[in-house]
Amino acid sequence: MEAFVIQRSDDESINVFETDFWKETTPGMLLAGYRLKHEMTQEQLAEKAVFTMLSSAHTKMGSAS
C-alpha cells in the first residue's frame, strides 16, 4: 500500500500510516466518515457497496473467459 505523507512544515513530513490517529481508526470509522462526507444513509452505502461488489465480480468473470 502506498504511504501518504503529511507535510508538517517545510522541513518535516510524516507517514500517515504511522500516526496514532491511523493506528486507532477502525474500518467502521472509515466507512462512517465516507458515508457522512457524502451525505449517504446506511442503506445508500450498502446499495453502493453491493453494486461495486457485483460489478467487480462481473469484471473478473469476464476476464476469465
Image (cartoon, rainbow, N blue to C red):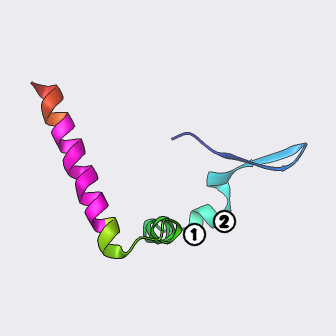
Main secondary-structure element of the magenta-colored stretch:
helix
- Distance, label 1 to label 2, CA atoms, is 6 Å
**Residue tagged 2:** 20
Amino acid type, residue under disc 1 in the picture: Glu
Three-letter amino acid code at the position of disc 2: Asp
- Identify the residue at image location x=90%, y=42%: 11
Q: Residue at x 34, y 66 (%)?
A: 45
Q: Residue at x 64, y 45 (%)?
A: 4
Dot 2 falls on a residue whose secondary structure is helix
At 28% from the left edge and 51% from the top edge, which residue is drawn?
52
Task: Give the secondary structure at mark 1.
Answer: helix
Which residues are drawn in magenta?
46-59
Instruction: Report the disc number at residue 39.
Output: none
Instruction: Answer left or right for 46 relative to 32.
Output: left
Query: Where residue 9 sits in the image (x, y, percent)?
Result: 88, 49
In the orientation shown, which residue stands out farthest toward the right?
10
Labelled disc at residue 24? 1
In the rendered view, would you say 64 is above or below 27?
Answer: above
| x then y, percent, for residue 25 | 54, 68
User: Residues at badges 1 and 2 in contact (C-beta under 8 Å)?
Assistant: yes
Residue 52, relative to residue 22: is it above or below? above
